[in-house]
Image (spheres, coloured by chain):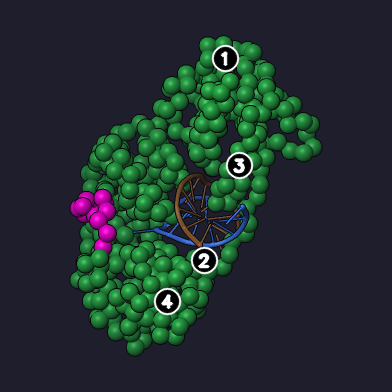
Chain colours: A green, B brown, C blue
Amino acid sequence: MKQSKDIVNHFNINQFQHDLISWFEKEQRTLPWRADQDPYKVWVSEVMLQQTRVDTVIPYFNNFIQQFPSIESLANADEEKVLKAWEGLGYYSRVRNLQAAVKEVHENYGGKVPNTREEISQLKGVGPYTTGAVLSIAYGVPEPAVDGNVMRVLSRILSIWEDIAKPKTRRLFEEVVRSIISKENPSFFNQGLMELGAIVCTPTSPSCLLCPVREHCRGFHEGVQDQLPVKSKKKSSKTVQLTASVLTNEDGKVLIHKRPGTGLLANLWEFPNVEVTEEAGSEQEQFLAYLQTHYRAKADLQKPFATIQHVFSHLVWNIQVYRGTLESEVEQTSTIKLVDFTELENYAFPVSHQNILKVYKEVESKA
DNA sequence: TAAGCGTGGCC
DNA sequence: TGGCCAAGCTT
């Protein structure tokens, strides 16, 4: 691994800072979280933007801030409503961690987001990137905020060939940023690097001819910008077979289940479902046995009305979906509910189960 | 360190 | 169309 000192040797730091920040001042996009530097709003936006596109985040951010405009309002909010506000955004542990961290700020920091690396980085869900982003953008502290954009942009500008998929490489880039960040305007420096990655120095086909820091770019001068950054591929995902059902009782109410508080889609609601295997008898038999043990419910299953595939980042669900009628009473608990269809909108569902409901309604309307 | 953790858009 | 990608964090 190279040393960051060697990497920035002969690099015109002052001119680079000036060119980058001037460009950002002129060309930055108008985004809702840039209206002010309220540390809480900066924080919320940074958490939402983790692994998520700007265009996707914008409506979620506006709605979330409208519902929970302050540290106090989010600290006191019902978790069910918080999850509902995050529904469809993915990586749901982000928002459970955010609320837990906001509660800590409310209780232990007088409702003020801490402004030191030591304090803020210890909050739940606040890692190295978010620490640097909030410190630099909200408080003007010259800390690195190294995300995928920054690694791509700097790997090209400085011709760095380390594998950016490795955790160790992020730490190298943090060292590099520490050695070139503007002490006068760390906010615009960090945001400028990210903005450049988002609209000019894109993953494929970077617009080098429009780049404000082209003169500083070793990758461009060497004609290797398309080979950078180096990023190893991750393993392909597994496929899981699931059987699920929309089960209604004689009152027309539907059975829903709350997922466990840890792991995939934690604390979200779903229609009853179980993983089925080749060996353990027919798919339908396995599902009926599951209903008996998990819900103490008997049901009359019709034929599957849909096959839904849902692709996650690390796995694929193939879901056979049955329509069915409950033939016994179901005891309701904190994780098992019988609700009217019109009430489903009060519960947060993963997209896969939103799709189950959508197809179910389409089939019902035709019948 | 590697794997788990969502979703939608893009070509 | 399936793989890749997008302002990462936790364990």
Marked residue chain, label 4? A
| Cα gap from disc 2 to disc 1, whole angstroms | 50 Å
Q: Write the start and end of the magenta stretch as one range.
A: A28-39
Marked residue chain, label 2? A
* Residue to which mark 1 is pinned: A249
* Residue to which mark 4 is pinned: A156
- Looking at marks 1 and 3 on the same chain, the residue that comes earlier in the sequence is marked by 1
Residue A188 in sight: no
User: Disc 3 residue type?
Assistant: Gln
* Residue to which mark 2 is pinned: A165
Report the mark closest to the observer, 2 or 3: 3
Report the mark closest to the observer, 2 or 1: 1
On the same chain, marks 4 and 1? The answer is yes
How would you rate the neighbour count of disc 3 (Cα within 10 Å): few for under 14, some for 14-19, many for 20 or more? some
On the same chain, marks 3 and 4? The answer is yes
On the same chain, marks 1 and 3? The answer is yes
Q: Nearer the viewer, residue A233 or A70?
A: A233
Query: Any magenta on residue A31?
Result: yes
Report the mark closest to the observer, 2 or 4: 4
| Cα gap from disc 3 to disc 4, whole angstroms | 38 Å
Marked residue chain, label 1? A
* Residue to which mark 3 is pinned: A309
How would you rate the neighbour count of disc 1 (Cα within 10 Å): few for under 14, some for 14-19, many for 20 or more? some
Secondary structure category for the residue under label 3: strand
